[in-house]
Each structure stands twice: as C-alpha cells, then as structure tokens.
Amino acid sequence: MTDFPDANGFFGDARDGEPGPRYGGRYVAETLMPLIGEIEAAYDAARIDPDFQARLHELQQDYVGRATPLYFAERLSEHFGGAQIYLKREDLNHTGAHKINNALGQALLAQRMGRKRLIAETGAGMHGVAVATVAARLGLTCVIYMGATDIERQQPNVQRMRLLGAEIVPVHNGTATLKDAMNEALRDWVANVDDTFYIIGTVAGPAPYPRMVRDFQAVIGRETREQMIDRHGRLPDTLVACVGGGSNAMGLFHAFLDDTDVALVGAEAAGEGLDSGRHAASLNGGAPGILHGNRTYLLQSDDGQILDAHSISAGLDYPGVGPEHAYLHDSGRASYVAVTDDEALGAVSLCCRLEGILPALESAHALHEAGRLAATQRDDQVIVVCLSGRGDKDMDTITRHLMPEGISA
Amino acid sequence: MNAPDASTPMTTAERASRETDRTEALSRGESRLAKRFAALREANRAALITYVMAGDPDPATSRELMNRLPTAGADIIELGMPFSDPMADGVAIQRAGERALAGGQTLAGTLDQVRDFRQQDDDTPIVLMGYLNPIQRFGETRFLEAASDAGVDGLILVDLPAEHAATLTAKARDLGLSRIPLVAPTTPAERLPALLAQGDGFVYRIAFNGVTGSQSLDLEGPLGSALAQLKQQTPLPIAVGFGVRNAESAAAVARVADAVVVGSALVERLVESGVEGALALTETLAEAIQQARQSG
C-alpha cells in the first residue's frame, strides 16, 4: 500500500487478474512532459541526499517550528463523552497551517534545480502565503495565481502575500476559484519553462506531485506516530483530517497506511448538503475523470465538463481530490464522509469556546466528524484530528455567519 | 443540447467491414488525410488547417462556418471539442469554449456537427482537438467508434502524452482514426522516436512554449532548424501551430512546413465580424499560402 505510486505515477493495481481502477498519472501537454521528468529526477536525487534532508530538517525545526504539539483536547473530549480527542497542531506552524511543510520542501528543490522564479495557485491563500514566505526566505521571485472570488473572501492573506513581496495575479476565468487559478498557473508554466518552478499546493497534479507533496507532508503523521507511542505506548484508533485536495490528510495518513487497525477518515466539504448540488465532495458526489494532470474523482456533468465546487471554506473549494485518496477510497483503506458548512461553523464555535483555539474552517470539517465519532466510542479509544490551520483568515466569514449582529452580541 | 445520439445504429458485421476498410485505407495511405497531403505535395503547396470551436458562438453559426470553410480555402478542418478547463489554451480559445458550452454544446453535438458536414463534403479531412475528460465520460471506445462513424479522420488530444496513449492510439488506428502527435519546443531529441512512432496522419509541431495564440512566430530562430531536424525523422507531414495570425506569418510557415494551423486568430475574427469575417480571413490566408512557395 505504501509502494504506490508506480513508475508512471499511478496509484492502484490489478485485482483478480483484471486491471483495477488506477488514479494519478501524468496527463499534461507535451510542452510540460520533459519538465516534469526533470523535476521527478531532481526530487528522487534530493530525497536520498543527506545534505538536502539536513537542510530541510533544520528549516522545519528552526523556521517552521516543528515538531508541532499533539495536544489532548480535554474539554472537547468531555463534551462528546466518548473517545479521547487529540489535536495535531499544524495551526502552530509558521504561517499558520500545514501548507508550509510542502512549500518549504518544493522551494528547496527549486533552488537546488537553479530555478529563480516560483509560481503557485492558492484558494484560501494559505498555500500562497506559505510559498510567498519561503520565496522571501530563499530570495526567489514569487507569483501567486488566485481566483478573483477567493481574493475577495480572503483579503488578509492577499495583503500578507503582497507584504512578503509576491505578485498576486487575479484569475477571472471560469468560476474564478482554485481550479481556475491552477489552470492559469499551468499556462504560466508552459510559457516560462526555462526559469520557473510550479509549487503545487496539494497532493494532486501530474506525477510526481502527488507523491512529492505527500512525502513533504508526511512529517505530520511521522510525528503523530512517535508522539502517540511516547505518551500512550500505542497507536491511535482513528485519524481524521479534512480533504479538499487532501494534502494534510495524506500527510497524517501516510505513516499509518500499513497499520490496518488504525481507521483513516477524510472529511470532505458537503457545502449546503450533498443533495443541494452545492458542495465540494468529489469522492462522495463525483465520478472518476481527468483534470490538472491526474486521473481522480471529479465533480463533473454528464458531458464531462467540470462543475463549480462550493464550500464555505475556500481551501476545500476544489472539484477534484488527490489521486491517492481516490485509491484509498476505492480500496476501502480510508473512508470519506461529507460535512456541511453549518456543521463546520458549529465546530469552529465549539473549539473556540471549549479549547480556546480558533481553527480554520477547513480543519473544522475534520473536528466536526471527530466529535461525531467520539460520541460513539469508548473513553479508552483515541482519535487524532489534524488541526491543519488557524482560523484568523476566516474571521470575516465566521463573523458573518455566527455573529451576524457583531462580535459583541 | 438537442443533438441526436451520436451513434447511429449499425450492425456488428457492417461496423466490422467498415473498420477493416478504413484501417486498410489508413495503412495504404488512402485516408482522407493521406490523400489530401499527397495532392498538396503534388501541387507544391502547404495545407491550410483552420481551427474552429464546435458550437461557437452557437451551434447553427458554428455549423455554417465549418461547412463553408473548404470553399474559402481550408484544406483540413480542426474542430475544437469545448472543455470547461482548457489548461493549454490561450484566452481566445478559452472564451470560444465558454461560449460553446453556454450555448449547450455537447460531445454528441460535436460529432453530429461532423456528420452534418459529411453530408456535403466527403473529402476534407476533419481532426477533432480537445481534452480527455469529456471523452472518458462519454466512454473512450464508444467515442472512438462514434467519431469514426461520423466521419472524423484524426484526433489531437492535448492532455494525453505518449506515455499514456498506447491503448487509445491502437483502438483509434483499428477504427481508421489517426492520433496526431504533438511535438513541443521542449521535447528532447531522445523522446522524439517514441512520439513519432505512435503517430498517424501528421505531426503537430507547437511553435513555441506557451498557450495557443499567445505569441507571434519567429522562423529565423530555433524553430526553423528544429523543423529541418524533425523532417529527417518522420515521413509524416509536419504542421506548425500556435502563433499564425496573418497572411505574412502563414506564408512564412508555408515555406518551411507541410501545413499551417490557424486557430486563435480565426476564432477572434468570428467573434469580431461573424462568419463572413472568418471566411474572409480564411481566403486571405489560403491565398498567402498558395503564393508562398512560388514567390520564394
């Protein structure tokens, strides 16, 4: 299970002698194919280079602030009256989310390859902020593509990226959200192949991105595993993480894939409900197809056109999902549930009041599912939730929905 | 939106016999594409390949334009299959796809547009160009059969690299459809033999690194020498696309390549000045290509 992807970037294998469903691959324009091959070769060399790993580790520790705590959420656990809930505090990373784990890794790789210009797409802005941050740290030029709709709802992050010296390019095409930003970043890359490195923010895109991003995020699960064993002498029973593209979830799950007693649960965004048609749950409400260089589950029409995703959290507002999640879904190794906008808002409120922690709206999807599960489990069971980011960026949205009369109310 | 089902009923035996005929024709060089290129070589003239988006700006206008393109001088027609997320296309073709989809264009409708064209023209080759997802959703085999049936001659699939193309290429070939390989400026020499060996019909050489319609051509530079090298490595005709905007650039390409692809400029002209405007541009380009090799 941990051997995937294969040499062509596919997750999944033959079943009963018949070719099973396979996800991933490298479905990109010919112009990009040689480049992607170069990145793969450079990554494979860096992965086993002790100097590269030492530099990455040093910056993870002193610049990002790793390891992040595995925090026992005592009052949340009491509230649900079942399993013990632990929070893996990725929100305490520099820049406030797990995104910097990957941005740092890829930026170091870009630097190693001699690329001077970083480009990235961003939805909620957390990946954009992370890339702008590491670009500043490493002295590289940075251009961030962001949907015009997202620019409007994530102003604080837009200002942050500008302050960090990044150029923000608003994308007005299509639905003006994350998928369109990704299309535009790919167009930039095709036109600037010589000096540019595209830092994809999630475990999607053409191979080797799903594997590379997963590997850079896998530090989340490795730490969690050690921290659990140190504290309890055993593994957790359940891991829960939110899934848009699914990078924090793959990061948490990866170290546990072969521990089949550990249940893996991904929380997709059900938006206004799976039946409303306004959601971002590609595994629960989509079908396999090809977008952005990989074969995976997609929200799409009967004619194969990509549909507009909807979620209150911009970071989950994407009509696809990483191909490894598609594989884990089909194989049954992980299960994927859908959590609505309202349920996520409820979890934000609860986590603030009971733990004094303001979670990102994305992470709140996982918190809601963890609470629901905890209530059905015994108090000697352990659930670890990836608290993938902090919620400061969402204050406008949260205030509008939870406190329409203002903070004082 | 009201397009009839793309696959007309046909018995298995009829289909098998027709497939055999077409496969043989392809291997004997008797496909529409091979015949057209042979005739053009005879006449010492490059082909004009005109790209239009199926259903842009509405199904009726798109059909009218397509049906009249051969008379205006188009030798081969590239018909775009609209997709919501055309990551390799520039803004002109993106907008064309958006208009087509807003007008209700479907993949079945696109195949029906080809069938409609074939009622009046059985010689002009038609090549469909687009992205994989709508095809996979339609069903890959079902699509290839329906396309062959409708009178399509070739396919250009932007997001299907050679590494993943073997199965589709073989199926297409069995149905008499050419899968046309794309070669980019970034394609390294060692990658070329595999790309070319898989290809049928012609080779589509992308003129520069970028999206469709985003730059103008420079044939003095590396493109000219790259084309010369490419010619040494394949017997297939070579078309150059991405950047032909006017008579001058069309003539320049016509002197060094076997075919000149014009897409974004034509799509823009259709929006600005309708079918007549697009046909006028086609005539201008056809004339420039006609004279290109005579004047030097």
Image: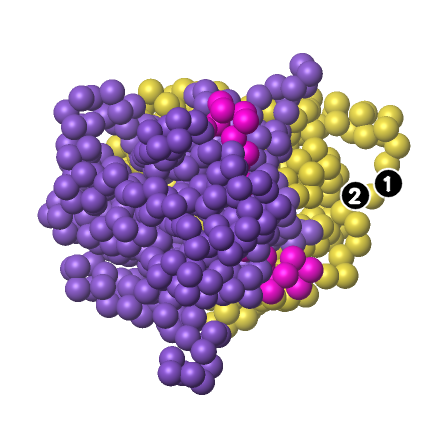
Q: Quadrant of residue A198?
A: top left
Q: Position of residue A181 (x, y in %)?
A: 39, 56
Magenta segment boundaries in residue numbering: A256-279
The vertical placement of B146 against A153, above or below, is: above
* Left or right: B107, with A145 as reference point: right
Which chain is yellow in the picture? B
At 27% from the left edge and 51% from the top edge, which residue is drawn?
Answer: A92
Mark-to-mark CA distance, 2 and 1: 6 Å
* Left or right: B280, with A232 as reference point: right
Q: Position of residue B72 (x, y in %)?
A: 55, 57
At 35% from the left edge and 59% from the top edge, which residue is drawn?
Answer: A357
Q: Which residue is mark 1?
A: B9
SS assignment at label 2: loop
Q: Position of residue A142 (x, y in %)?
A: 21, 53
- Taking the magenta stretch, the answer to whether it contains residue A257 is yes
Q: Which residue is mark 2?
A: B7
Q: What is the three-letter code of the residue carrying label 2?
A: Ser
Colour chain A is painted in? purple
The vertical placement of A209 against B249, above or below, is: above
At 53% from the left edge and 41% from the top edge, which residue is drawn?
Answer: A379
Which sits in the foreground, A178 or B217? A178
The vertical placement of A17 against A379, above or below, is: above
